[in-house]
């Protein structure tokens, strides 16, 4: 029997220095072929001070051995190649393919640092940014392109409260979206609502709100003169005990001379909307449900006066948070309205050859003058005291007197629920009907946008909020085209 040639006695693998057993032909750790290891020389080579290694006595002649590189100057040895970085052959002797090139790493984008000459990795900032972002509104949006406010995206989910997000709104480990400045389109928006890049103040979430719930739609806008939106709304759909559909719309206008009017309108609209959507399915008559909803809204606004933030500023019953409220409930054959203050409800029939109507009476100085026969309507509303309200929701209200009324229209139409920010520019029922698009009953969201645009085109002196409710209430699932 032929024998394999004896390999040199080696105690450690020349490649990985793994201890070897006698008779091993391959390293058990790295697979190194130990049969190729030459016999150990009598003397170990001496490393010269210049890091060069003299050729060992067992080396073949004519080999140009490389000189090791010096250290990096800090006393650490020069880096060496890993085995995977050196070209070689596979087990069959074929050349290994070269490793794929490593793509260059893109520089991190920075938004919070100024242009600095000591940071060559940071691209230079442009000399100036346009302060007006491109207009994001669709072609059907009624607002003029000359609107002086910064552009913003509509908020599709309706009124959004200020403050921290509710627990569970962002999954653990999920990245949080970063708001980008609407002016320069590059900077990050800080917690105070300003761009960290160009310093531009960002629009608040309530500056413009839109919501569509089945066949009901509402739009609210800050307007062109106010620094914030003090209006709020609530819209929704439900079913009566017999399964008939019912639509609900609540619109509230904060009293600007009161403390925290924006909080008051938001609290009132939410409380009234939730009350209606809970009471109607239980079988409560829509007119009684509207009365109870106004009372619930009043309690919600009154509660704001007891909060510490208000108590520190003034006594609870002096200049407490306050707002007005107007609402509508539409079923298959009944239209119920309710209000406190000077926000209004209009009836606009689909057949414009029939007359429209205003369904509410203002709680205002002007309305009292007209009712008492002391002034004509034109004279009263031309007076500077016209919009002084005599009824509102708030802890300092004289007495809560919810107004409700029921109607049974004999033809289809659309119910317009709005604040004075709209009806100031379409005061009479005829003027409102002229401003309402002909297809508003079929496309209420589009119609609400058009009406807000009508107010902005007229000057936008106040916050503008409008909800459109088609009558009769269509079956569940119907909405804007």
Image: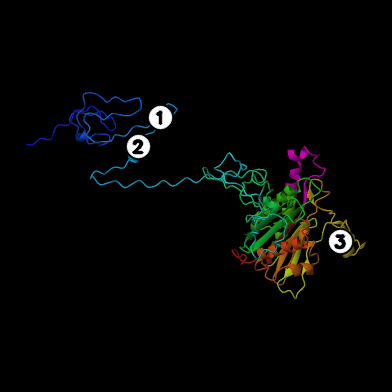
Task: Name the residue beneath numbered marker 2.
Answer: 82
Label at residue 381? 3
- Position of residue 380 relative to residue 226, above or below, is below
Give the foreground label among 1 and 3: 1
What crowding class fits label 1: few (fewer than 14 Cα within 10 Å), some (14-19), or many (20 or more)? Answer: few
Quadrant of residue 146 within the rendered picture = bottom right
Residue 305 in the image: state x and y as whole percent.
76, 42
Residue 325: give x, y in percent of width and height.
Answer: 75, 55
Circle 3 residues within 10 Å: few <14, some 14–19, many ≥20 = many
How far apart are the two marked residues, 1 and 2, measured between alpha carbons? Answer: 17 Å
Identify the mark at residue 23; answer none if there is no mark.
none
Q: Nearer the viewer, residue 306 or 34?
A: 34
Query: Which tag, 1 or 3, sits closer to the chain's start?
Result: 1
In percent of width and height, residue 210 lies at 66, 58
Between disc 3 and disc 2, whose residue precedes? 2
Q: Is residue 445 above or below residue 438?
A: above
Q: Nearer the viewer, mark 3 or mark 2?
A: 2
Residue at mark 1: 71
- The quadrant in which residue 470 appears is bottom right
| Residue 70 seen | yes
Does the magenta portion include 319? yes
Q: Secondary structure at mark 1?
A: loop
- Whole-Å distance between the Cαs marked 3 and 2? 88 Å
Task: Give the magenta part as a residue range.
Answer: 298-323
Residue neighbourhood size for the residue with mark 2, other residues' Cα within 10 Å, grouped as few (<14), some (14–19), many (≥20): few
Is 318 displayed left or right of 192 in the figure? right
* C-alpha separation, residue under disc 1 versus residue under disc 3: 91 Å
Mark 1 / mark 2, whichever is N-terminal: 1
Residue 405 is at least partly visible in this image: no
Instruction: Kindly state the secondary structure of the residue where label 3 is placed.
Output: helix
Mark 1 vs mark 2: in front: 1
Say how the picture is coloured: rainbow
């Amino acid at each position: 029997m032929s024998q394999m040639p004896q390999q040199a006695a080696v105690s450690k693998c020349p490649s990985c220095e793994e201890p070897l057993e006698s008779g091993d032909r391959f390293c058990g750790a790295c697979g190194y072929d130990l049969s190729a290891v030459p016999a150990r020389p009598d003397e170990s080579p001496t490393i010269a001070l210049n890091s060069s290694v003299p050729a060992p006595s067992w080396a073949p002649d004519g080999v140009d051995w490389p000189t090791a590189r010096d250290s990096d100057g800090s006393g650490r040895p020069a880096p060496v190649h890993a085995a995977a970085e050196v070209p070689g052959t596979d087990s069959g002797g074929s050349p290994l393919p070269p490793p794929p090139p490593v793509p260059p790493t893109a520089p991190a984008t920075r938004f919070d640092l100024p242009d600095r000459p000591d940071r060559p990795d940071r691209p230079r900032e442009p000399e100036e940014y346009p302060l007006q972002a491109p207009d994001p509104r669709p072609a059907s949006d009624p607002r003029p392109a000359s609107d002086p406010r910064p552009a913003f995206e509509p908020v599709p989910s309706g009124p959004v409260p200020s403050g921290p997000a509710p627990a569970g709104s962002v999954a653990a480990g999920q990245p949080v979206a970063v708001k980008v400045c609407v002016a320069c389109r590059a900077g990050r928006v800080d917690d105070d609502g300003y761009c960290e890049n160009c310093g531009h103040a960002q629009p608040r979430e309530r500056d413009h709100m839109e919501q569509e719930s089945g066949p009901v739609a509402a739009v609210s806008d800050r307007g062109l003169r106010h620094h914030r939106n003090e209006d709020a709304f609530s819209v929704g759909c439900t079913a009566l005990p017999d399964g008939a559909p019912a639509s609900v719309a609540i619109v509230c206008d904060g009293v600007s001379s009161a403390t925290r009017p924006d909080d008051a309108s938001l609290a009132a609209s939410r409380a009234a909307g939730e009350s209606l959507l809970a009471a109607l399915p239980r079988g409560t008559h829509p007119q009684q449900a509207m009365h109870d909803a106004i009372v619930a809204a009043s309690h919600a606004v009154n509660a704001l006066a007891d909060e510490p933030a208000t108590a520190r500023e003034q006594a609870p019953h002096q200049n407490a948070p306050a707002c007005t409220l107007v609402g509508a409930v539409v079923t298959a054959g009944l239209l119920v309205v309710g209000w406190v203050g000077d926000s209004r409800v209009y009836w606009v029939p689909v057949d414009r050859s029939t007359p429209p109507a205003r369904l509410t009476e203002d709680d205002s100085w002007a309305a009292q003058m007209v009712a008492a026969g002391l002034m004509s309507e034109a004279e009263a509303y031309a007076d500077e005291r016209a919009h002084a309200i005599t009824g509102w929701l708030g802890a300092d209200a004289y007495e809560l007197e919810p107004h409700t009324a029921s109607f049974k229209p004999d033809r289809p139409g659309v119910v317009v629920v709005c604040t004075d920010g709209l009806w100031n520019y379409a005061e009479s029922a005829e003027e409102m009907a002229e401003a309402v698009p002909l297809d508003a009953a079929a496309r209420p969201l589009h119609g609400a946008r058009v009406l807000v645009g009508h107010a902005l085109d007229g000057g936008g002196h106040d916050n503008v909020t409008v909800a459109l409710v088609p009558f009769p209430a269509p079956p569940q699932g119907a909405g804007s085209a």
